[in-house]
Image (cartoon, rainbow, N blue to C red):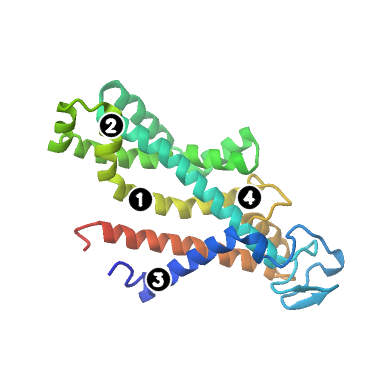
Amino acid sequence: MFWPQAGGGVPAGVFVTILATMVVVAIFAPLIAPYDPNTQNLLGRLKPPGTLARDVYYVLGSDELGRDLLSRVIYGARVSLSVAFLSVILSGCVGITLGMLAGYRGGWVEVVVMRFVDIFLSIPAILLAIIMVAVLGPGFVNVVLVLALTRWPRYARVAYGQTLAISNQPYVRLAKAMGAGPVRVLFLHILPNIIAPLAVVATLEFGLMVLFEAGLSFLGLGVQPPTASWGAMLSVGRNYVSSAWWIATFPGLCLFLLVLSVNLIGDRLSAYLNPKSR
């Protein structure tokens, strides 16, 4: 079966359900959130979960400005998932294209692309992301671009190795003999046969992108206030751990569940797509 068990004997379907629920919540956040996530109520600041203040019922409590924490957590899911999705798509497109091109053409193209890959991989990704955000400035678009630019070498490395292994297969040589151009060979004959390992990489990278976005927002370099972000909420919540534990606890719990679910799904996907594992 595809989803029998995940880590610790927990059925992997549980984590698929968690991820699917977060995606639905993020998409329909305006319909699900009980209040505007940016509406302040200073008379209701730092209220614990289950408190009613000025006709506002704080299910998960309120933050230091009296904003409803449940609404902010819901909108924070939209930020985390959208940044991760867009950065994975962009980095995947760049890395897969360059990796396949290097493996297929060889020569100076291979040397140039793979040396750039080596350079990027030699620098810690989070450090490179912090430097690039400091140069470009914070914000949603810049965070997506920075994360994509720092993570494309991972896809390029896998695509390069897989392309080298497939380039000399009979069906590829036959396509070349029949006059197929490089673009047709790469995207119609090679890419469909290397998509499985790349899908596993993309799944695992998705969880990493969520953590990177949260880390940048925690440092004040990600999505800027008043936009709700789990990383920024954790940054604020650390100042109120002893007096208002809920500010950091609920965003941190959502972040933990999201990353755990994505990583375990990626692990099961890797095992399923690997014939030796099966």
Residue 257: image location, x then y, percent: 51, 66
Residue at the image point whose x is 33% and y is 35% from the top: 99
Discs 1, 3 touching: Cβ within 8 Å = no
Q: Provide the residue designation for mark 2.
A: 184
| Mark 3 → mark 4, Cα distance in angstroms | 30 Å
Q: Amino acid at mark 3?
A: Gly
Instruction: Identify which amino acid the numbered label 4 is placed on.
Output: Ser
Q: Are marks 3 and 4 in contact (CB under 8 Å)?
A: no
Q: Earlier in the sequence, mark 1 or mark 2?
A: 2
User: First in sequence: mark 1 or mark 3?
Assistant: 3
Q: Is residue 55 above or below residue 214?
A: below
**Alpha carbon of mark 2 to alpha carbon of mark 4: how far?**
41 Å
Could you tell which of marks 2 and 4 lies nearer the N-terminus? 2
Left/right of residue 143 with respect to residue 276 in the rendered view: right
Say which element carries label 3.
Answer: helix
Mark 2 or mark 3: which comes first in sequence?
3
Rendered view: 276 above or below 152: below
Residue highlighted by disc 1:
199
Q: Which residue is mark 4?
A: 217
Residue at the far left: name it: 170
Within 10 Å of disc 2 (Cα), the crowding (few <14, some 14-19, many 20+) is some
Where in the figure is residue 63, as x and y percent of width and height?
A: 75, 64
Which of the image's four quarters has the N terminus? bottom left
Q: CA distance from mark 1 to mark 2?
A: 21 Å
Q: Which residue, given by chain and number where applicable, does mark 3 sit on?
A: 13
In the picture shown, does residue 158 fall above or below 6? above
Q: Amino acid at mark 1?
A: Ala
- What secondary structure is marked by label 1? helix
Q: Nearer the viewer, mark 2 or mark 4?
A: 2
Give the image quarter of residue 190: top left
